[in-house]
Image (cartoon, rainbow, N blue to C red):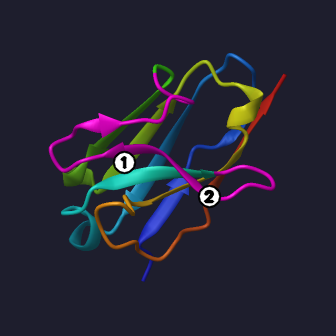
Amino acid sequence: QVQLVESGGGTVQAGGSLRLSCEFSGDIFSARAMGWYREAPGQQRELIAAINLDGRPAYPDSVKGRFTISRDNSKSTMYLQMNSLKPEDTGVYYCNADWRQAQLGVWGQGTQVTVSS
């Protein structure tokens, strides 16, 4: 039973854009605050965008103003629009519940984002 499937990653030059998608099991995640996580090379996985059930987003300073998270529960899908990408945005991106508010599900395989300088 697949719970989370990420897609949309790729290789872009600095300043470019990507849009990530996350298909989630609606019966498991539609009632949870959710988030996007990034695992940069040699670093721990970190929460880089979160969205509440009412659609209110939250971002750390590192991506604020450049990334936009959204969700469409009717499609069981969450998105991450990433603009003005920087080399330090490179990493594997995962979606899951927002660990601060809800129980995490089984991690998917993630999607690789590589930003070249």
In this rendering, the answer to whether 47 lies above or below 20 is: below
Could you say where residue 23 lies in the image, as x and y percent from the top left?
Answer: 40, 58
- Residue 32 placement, left or right of 108: left
Q: What number is the disc on residue 60?
A: none
Which residue extends farthest left?
Answer: 54
In this rendering, the answer to whether 40 lies above or below 83 is: below
Residue drawn at 73 percent across, 55 percent down: 43
Q: Quadrant of residue 18?
A: top right
Residue drawn at 52 percent across, 71 percent down: 107
Residue drawn at 68 percent across, 35 percent down: 89
In this rendering, the answer to whether 40 lies above or below 102 is: above
Does 56 lie within the magenta span?
Answer: yes
What secondary structure predominates along the stretch shown in magenta?
loop
Q: Quadrant of residue 103?
A: bottom left
Does 52 lie within the magenta span?
Answer: yes
Label 1 secondary element: strand
Residue drawn at 54 percent across, 68 percent down: 108
Label 1 packing within 10 angstroms: few (<14), some (14-19), many (20+) = many
Could you say where residue 111 lies in the image, as x and y percent from the top left?
Answer: 63, 53
Magenta span: 39-64
Q: Tell me, yes or no, if residue 76 can be seen here.
A: yes
Q: Which residue is mark 2?
A: 45
Q: What number is the disc on residue 78?
A: 1
Label 2 secondary element: loop
Q: Tell me, yes or no, if residue 12 can be seen here.
A: no
Q: Amino acid at mark 1?
A: Met
Question: Which quadrant would the C terminus be assigned to in this image?
Answer: top right
